Image (cartoon, rainbow, N blue to C red):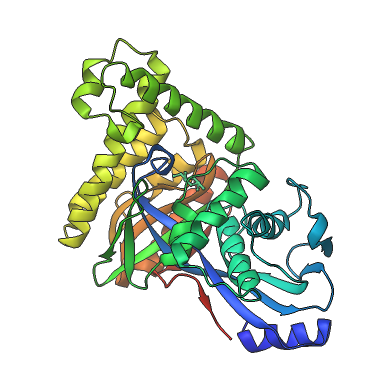
Amino acid sequence: MKTSELSQHFETTFGSRPHIFRAPGRVNLIGEHTDYNDGFVMPAAVGFSTYVAIAPRPDRKLKIHSDEFSGDFEFDLDRLPEKRTGAWCDYVVGVAWVLRQQGHQLDGANLIVHGEVPIGAGLSSSAALEVSSALALLSLTPTSLPLPDVAKLCRRAENEFVGAKVGIMDQFVSCMGKAGHAFLLDCRSLEYKFVPIPAGIQLVVCNTMVKHDLATGAYNTRREECEAGARAFARWDSSIRALRDVSVELLDQHKNDVPATIWKRCSHIVRENQRTLDAARALTAGDLPEVGKLMRESHNSLRDLYEVSCRELDIMVESAQGLPGFCGGRMTGGGFGGCTINLVREENAEDFAKQIAERYRQATGINPQVYLCSAEDGAEALS
Ligand code: GLA
């Protein structure tokens, strides 16, 4: 949908001219489940975005409408729910709730949400909705917040209001992404560095079209296992605050001193952090074979040690092997379904998309969606 159409739609619905804000979804090239361990991630914002059109109302109501997601919602700003209701508007209300908690003056507003990020595909439709809503709501207040602070408040909305204990990656890259670049983020200090995607390389995202129910529960369990791991290793080195601080040497030295499952989770995180730093270096140097090797290792580790892959993701990763122009691929996002990310030479990308879809269809009987993406800019005000 064009900005002018959304604006027109808003005027017809609410009778006033809106301001429009956009925030993108993301893919993660490498560094999976490392963000909540104070580690490193390397995502990129992609060309699917959520748009929020907003204009003030004279009362204290927040009215939220979307054509794609069902239900019209109305809230009193002075009596916002304290936690999730289970509807998609939780992500908008959660942001309003955090803004109120942080003492921002919010007045009544009408909002129309237009979402283009595939839902439940692991491409961060929720972060895109949070960030676009935050920019929209903030635009009606006297304060302007730096984008990293917007990312933090959106994460807080998801952690405390929606109840998903996610890390900072999705909200941060949705705010700070840069066209043509991946983004190496230190999730402890929030320092970051843009890493150019080599010329002629396309990001091909393959949607398995499955999302297994265990996603949320298993995510929170993995977090707890990591925290247990960090506590265990802190017995041997009191400076350890998170798995980010555990070295490969310490990890291997204590293989038999921690429960086997916990050790496997720790082993994934400790090595994935190193792989992410190595991949950033290799991508900068244009060393695609090395990047491909690291992505493959990352996938295997997520499958065997962290145990967050699934049959469909594994089949999609295998289906890419040997196709012309394929440089590297792995599952992306939280896991248990969703998408794989593939680096593919531009001239081969369309054929790659057709062939991988065919291989996957034959192996699973499921029709996948394949998106040819590039790295795009992060969130912005459009009008
Ligand atoms: C989800 C979370 C992120 C991150 C990934 C796994 O996308 O929102 O914070 O933990 O899973 O890397």
**Which one is nearer the viewer's eye here, 136 or 170?**
136
Locate the C terminus and report the quarter of the image it occupies: bottom right
Placement of 22 over or under 103, stated as above or below: below
**Which one is nearer the viewer's eye here, 58 or 68?**
58
Q: Mark yes or no: residue 42 visible.
A: yes
Placement of 342 over or under 143, stated as above or below: above
Please state the horizontal and vertical placement of residue 133, each as a whole percent of the image.
63, 66
Please state the horizontal and vertical placement of residue 151, each as a whole percent of the image.
50, 59
The quadrant holding residue 148 is bottom left
Task: Give the residue drawn at x 39%, y 27%.
Answer: 265
The quadrant holding residue 337 is top right
**Which one is nearer the viewer's eye here, 340 or 75?**
75
Please state the horizontal and vertical placement of residue 313, each as a whole percent of the image.
47, 43
Q: Is residue 237 left or right of residue 178?
A: left
Placement of 332 over or under 217, stated as above or below: below
Task: Give the residue drawn at x 19%, y 61%.
Answer: 284
